[in-house]
Image: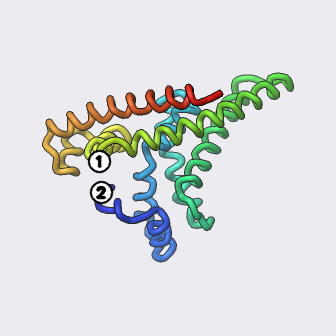
Amino acid sequence: MTDRFQHITDNELLSNFNADGNQEWIGILLQRYTLLLLGVCMKYLKDESEAKDCVQQIFLKVLTEVPKYKIDYFKSWLYMVAKNHCLMRLRDKTKNVKELTENTNIVQDETSKRDLQENEQTYALLEEAIDQLNPEQRTCVMLFYLQKQSYQQVADKTGFSLMQVKSYIQNGKRNLKILLEKKLKEKGQARP
């Protein structure tokens, strides 16, 4: 699915949706950024199952919110939706766990600002790392991990053999980790 629409820009997909109201156009956009959304949610929530749950909630939210706005940069808008969703979830969790004192709030606000800056940088680095995977690895990793497809389903969808799919997933996961760690290290060294 991703490869078939790769030549269509985000703005063209949005225009198509605005023209005919077909939610499949938004679905293609969401599929493009699923891995990035998961990365954002993992960074904020620190829990894989909760992050995956949030990605699904964000998908639903996006489907209802997109028609209400004129969106110029879908990826940036989606990132803000995801960030706000995660922050609200953390806020609700914090409320339920304990009552915060004024001093704790001040310290937390300062920490949150630092964390937000780091998270936004990590998000950008994750996006770069995903873009650097070869198309086969990127497609197989996204289908297997984010859409929870089996090896056989990935093979059926992509036309790759079962052995190729396993290899692309294994190598893609390893390469993504290496690329992201390298980028984080470079970024850390570049900071004053």
Rendering colour mode: rainbow
Q: Quadrant of residue 100?
A: top right
Characterize the local packing of mark 2: few (<14), some (14-19) or many (20 or more) Cα atoms within 10 angstroms. Answer: few
- Residue at point 51% right, 33% down? 42
- Residue at point 85% right, 23% down? 103
Where, quadrant-wise, is the C terminus in this rendering? Answer: top right
Of tags 2 and 1, the one toward the viewer is 1
- Residue at point 72% right, 27% down? 111
Numbered circle sitting on residue 135: 1
Q: Quadrant of residue 169?
A: top left
Q: Secondary structure at mark 2?
A: helix
Mark closer to the chain start, 2 or 1? 2
**Residue highlighted by disc 2:** 3
Marks 2 and 1, how far apart at CA: 9 Å
The amino acid sitting under disc 2 is: Asp
Numbered circle sitting on residue 115: none
Give the side of residue 38 with respect to residue 7, left or right. Answer: right
Near-viewer residue (22 or 38): 38
Q: How many marks?
A: 2
- Residue at point 38% right, 28% down? 178
Where, quadrant-wise, is the N terminus in this rendering? Answer: bottom left
Task: Please report contact status of discs 2 and 1: CB closer than 8 Å, yes or no.
Answer: yes
Q: Secondary structure at mark 1?
A: helix
- Position in image of residue 142 (x %, y %): 35, 43
- Position in image of residue 64 (x %, y %): 56, 60
Q: Quadrant of residue 108?
A: top right
What residue occupies the far right of the structure in this picture?
A: 102
The amino acid sitting under disc 1 is: Pro
- Position in image of residue 10 (x %, y %): 46, 62
| Residue 112 in the image: above or below residue 32 | above
Give the side of residue 112 with respect to residue 12, left or right. Answer: right
